[in-house]
Image (cartoon, rainbow, N blue to C red):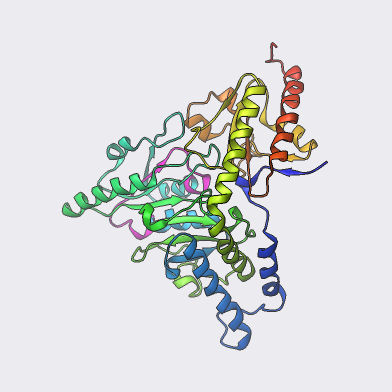
Amino acid sequence: MKDIYLDNAAGTPVDPLVRDVMLPYLFEYFGNPLSIHRFGEKPREALEIARQQVAALINAEPQEIIFTSNASEANNMAVKGIGLANQAKGKHVVISAIEHFSVMNSVKSLEKLGFQTSLLPVDNKGIIILDALNGLVTDGTVLVSVMHANHEVGTIQPIKELAAAIKILNAERKAKNLPQIFLHSDAVQTVGTIPVDARELGVDLLTFSGTQFYGSKGAAALFIRKGTRVFPLIDGGIQEEGKRAGVENIPAIVGMGKAAELIKPELAANAAKMEALRDALISGVLSKIKHSRLNGDAKLRLPTNVNISIEFIEGESMLMFLDGEGIAASSGSACTSRALKASHVLLAVGVPIEICHGSILFSLNKYITREDIEHVISVFPGIVERLRKMSPLWKG
């Protein structure tokens, strides 16, 4: 039985070429990059090469890239860092209703310090209602945070249009001597999956992670536009321009740099391949399983994302049966998959709570084949049928 990994929203497999460039920095070049002696030379050089590679992936300057240990840390740095750096000017933040918990809980931490939060609503496809922004912004607003694409339903947001709206607001606010509104976007699901240009998007801060484009765990990055001040969350040394103290994870960062270099020329071809497989999986499941529905927009979605609600059964049961067939999937966000709570994302887009619990997420990577997808389509309906026969809700 071949294992089929379709939980890539939680992290992709490491590219063998990435693994190979990491190994020397685990054993041979183990020095601290801040050390003056020769043992620090190679790691220091590798760190800056990786910074250039990662910056090139999103059309940024190397000095605008701050490495972190993971995307949650980068989101915390963006949200809390902007909030704390600007709290004397204003204490209000706007986030979308479907943000990752690392953004939502960062805002909750700010609320304990006197900040207020407003939620930008989404429509039934998971797309932000941009017209609602003006009604949410206050004189004290200092940050808007909206993810580039949702980690559960895969909807791609109009970040460029959002940035343009904020630019207009900032021009008006400057004339009134009100604080600047900074724009942050969690682009973990998009960078390395589709082309992302930080300059073109118009964001001030952008979070992304090597684990989403075939790098290893332990390295992510926050793009901070030149001139944007962020309050550091970790006190200590002068690493990462003084914004993030602590010795950098050189092997993982080297891997992220190599992964960025490898993935950039592949983006268009990978996206086209995965989009075709995504649509085949959606069509196959919806046609073979009655009382099933696609969550998110059918077209404005990640080429890797298939999120479907199956009525009358639980997502956890489906995952267990799929695992028994060698197929790995998810019931939503990896950060909450064991919590067995209804997804706040699905609730925000209007999925009834009883159907939320029957949702499943298949997320693809560049290694997935047509045969893999056909196997899932052949196996999954039988699993659903078996589970429905055991369900007291199923009436046939």
User: Residue placed farthest to the right in the image?
Assistant: 1
At 67% from the left edge and 69% from the top edge, which residue is drawn?
A: 22
Q: How far from the left and from the top, in percent, is residue 29? A: 67, 78
Please give the name of the residue rendered at 63% of the width and 84% of the height, measured from the top-left corner: 39
Question: Taking 171 as reference, is 41 left or right?
Answer: right
Q: Which residues are magenta?
A: 83-104
Residue 328 visible = no
Q: Nearer the viewer, residue 324 or 286?
A: 286
191 in the magenta segment = no
Task: Kindly identify the residue that appears in the image at 67 percent across and 57 percent down.
Answer: 14
Q: Quadrant of residue 373?
A: top right
Relative to 184, say whether 149 is above or below.
Answer: above
Residue 102 inside the magenta-drawn segment: yes
Rendered-image quadrant of the C terminus: top right
Residue 148: x and y in percent read 45, 46
Residue 29, above or below 126: below
Question: Residue lying furthest bottom in this view?
Answer: 37
Q: Position of residue 386 (x, y in %)?
A: 77, 22
Looking at this rendering, what residue extends furthest in the top direction?
395
From the image, which quarter does the N terminus lie in? top right
